[in-house]
Structures are given as structure tokens and as C-alpha cells.
Amino acid sequence: MRRQNLALVMGALAAHGPSSRAEVAERTGLTRAAVGSLVNELAAAGLTTDLGLAPSGRVGRPGTALALSGQGPAGLGLEIAVEHLGACVIDLHGTVRTWVEIEAPNRGRKPGEVLAELSDVAAAALQHAAAQGLHPVGTVVAVPGLVDAASGTVEQAPNLGWRDVPVAASPAQWLPATLRAVPVEVDNEANLGALAELWHGSTRPPDFVHVSAQAGIGAAVVIGGRLFRGARGFAGELGHVPVQPDGPVCTCGARGCLEQYAGEETVLRAAGLAGVGGDHIKTLTDEALAGNRRVLDALDRAGRALGTALSGAVNLLDPSALVLGGAYAELGEWLLPGMRAELAARVTVRPWNSEALQPSELGRRGPLLGAGTVTIRRIIEDPARYAAWRNTREVRKSS
């Protein structure tokens, strides 16, 4: 019961911001005495702070305003993408305090080289976070591939050329020394993008399909406000749904996968931009705005392929919304019309609102933002677990 009550208090402060003990008691249904005791416990764990006297508008002595701590425990998100590496640090309020991103052509590189460079990016983020009084207590790495969450292994990442890479199984081999006692997890970037949509996006319904697209195309399914992972954790591989069974061979070994019709390389090739350097999405955007007919046709075909693949998901799952995320959110002006046309033509067994398909406001920031927030959400939902981990760590340090 106390564990649940600690979570109630943390949740109230996370949802409503600075509050008096009386306000927390009112929102949680707990007594003021119980709230006082729980807040003392949370403060001892470094999770809350007193902001001083705050007038309540009621008769009597003003109460002390409480808030989640702006220093201390934080979440570290890391991202390995095909063309970049990133790190961010997020505080208990869900605020991004540090964001570091570098260009890095990771396709075909040895995993050890990529992880060593990611360690340098993480170190830069940690240095900036430490200057703000923050120390990450959990690390989550976003990758574009199939992940065995239990072992922390990237089983297959076709667009990186990785197979059976134990990213979280051996963090001491690549993480900065200050993080080696901190839990490390790995997750699919589309999953983390969907969680970011749930936690940071505009009001989303509790059921939606999130599409994360750029070099590869992934998806994630959120049902009842929770991520649906499937029996083995591999749900959402939209990029390898066949669009044409006898189509070209995909990097995964199958034929006619969606990525061969709507992946970044295919779109660039069809647009006559194969081999261009720099930010490919910006190049496509600039050319589309300039009215380049070849680019516009390539984006229309990609949108129709995406809509064709997603129509199966809509017919199967009946989601309230579809969210186009990742870098392709920036191309929504040209992708969405074709997507909507195919959905309208193929989702015929029930009414479908074309406006239920929308681009994400988070865009390509989603996976890294989600990775950094996972730790924070866990602390808020179960502060007792964090406090126990913190106490165990302190005991080990002193022994």
C-alpha cells in the first residue's frame, strides 16, 4: 500500500506541477499526515524538493509548495541511427536538459566502432548534465532493428548490417565509467518513438499506430496507453510487410518489402538524388518545395506504398489514429495525400476518418526523446523501487 501511495504522490506532482501538501492530499485522496510522511520519504531519495511557502487561497497558515526535484536523478537516452548518433538527458519533470547529436554514417561499420563513438557522445551529454546537478540513473539505447530486450542484444538491424550484437549485455566495454553501475537497456527506435508520442506529443488517443520512417521503416502499436510488443517483443516490423510479393530483394532477404518502395534510399533513387550527401530529408523537402516533378512523383509513390501497408494494420487493429513519425514527418505534406488515398480505398469494412492520419510533432526527435524518458516514467510510476536501488547502491559505495 505504501508503495502505491508513493506513486500516487509522485504522479500528482508530475501531472500538476508545484503543489502544497493539502493540494496533493486532495488530488490523491490521502490524508495530509500521510502525504507529509510520504513526501519526507521521497525527499530523502532526492525525488522532491520544497519551494518555500505558497499561499493556498485558504484561511490559515500558507503551506509549503512541493515539486519534483530539478536536480539529482535523470534519464539518459542514447540513439544509434543509420546516419547519426545522439544522446539526451531528461529530468524528473520530463524536460530535456541536454541534447547532443552528431552525423555518423553507421551503415556497415563495425559495432565496436559505433559504440565507441556513441560513448564519446554520451560523455559529452553527461558532462553538461553534471554541470546542472543531474546524474542519470538509467540508460536506454534506441536502435533501428529487432531487439531481445531480456538480453540487451540487437538480434538483427538490416540497415546497419548488424546481427547478434550484445549492446546492453556488455556495457562496461563501451559506456563511460560513470555509467557502468547504471542499468542499461536497448529498445527498437519505433517503440521509443511511440512512447515519446504518448508522453510528450499532443493529446493522443490511447490506441494508435506510430510509423517511424527514414532509412528503414518501423512501426509501434499502442493499445490502452501501453506499448504492444508481441509474443517475443518484435511487433511492428512494418518495413518488412510485403507490398509486392515478387518485388525486389530487401536487405532482410525477402522480396517486395515496404522498405523497397518507401525507404529513403528507394525514394532518393526514384527522385534522381541517389548519392547526394548531407541531410537527405532536407534535400527532398527543398526539392519538393521547388516543385521538382521527379521528387514529387517519388514521394507520392512512397506515400501510396505506406498507405497500402498501413491499410492492413488498420483493418486488423482498428486503431483510433495513425501517426507518421521519424524524419518522414517532415515530408508529410507530400506523403500524406497518397497514404490517405490508399487507406480510403482499402479500409472499406468500416468508416475511416482520413484526418486520423497525422504527422508527428516530434519528428526525428521521437526515438531519442522516448529513450531518455523511459527511466523518468519508471521512477514516477514506482518511486519505491528507485529508492531501494539507490539505497543498495549507496551501501555498495560505502563498503
Image (tube, rainbow, N blue to C red):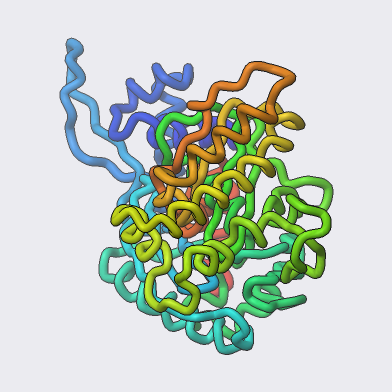
The residue at 30%/71% (across/down) is 128
Above or below 371: residue 31: above
- On-image quarter of the N terminus: top right
The residue at 50%/66% (across/down) is 268
Judged from this view, the residue extending furthest toward the top is: 59
Image position of 298 (left or right of 229): left
Image position of 286 (left or right of 374): left
The residue at 44%/75% (across/down) is 122
Q: Where residue 218 sits in the image (x, y, percent)?
A: 63, 54
Q: Where residue 289 sits in the image (x, y, percent)?
A: 31, 53
- On-image quarter of the C terminus: bottom right
Q: Where residue 114 sits in the image (x, y, percent)?
A: 55, 83
Question: Depth check: 341 or 56 in front?
Answer: 341
Instruction: Count the marks.
Output: 0
Quadrant in which residue 99 is drawn: bottom left
Above or below 256: residue 158: below
Judged from this view, the residue extending furthest toward the front is: 293
Image position of 395 (left or right of 373): right
Q: Is residue 156 visible?
A: yes
Question: Depth check: 338 or 52 in front?
Answer: 338
Question: Depth check: 7 or 264 in front?
Answer: 264
The residue at 69%/44% (across/down) is 309
Q: Where residue 231 sits in the image (x, y, percent)?
A: 83, 47
Q: Is residue 43 visible?
A: no
Above or below 233: residue 207: above
Image position of 202 (left or right of 234): left
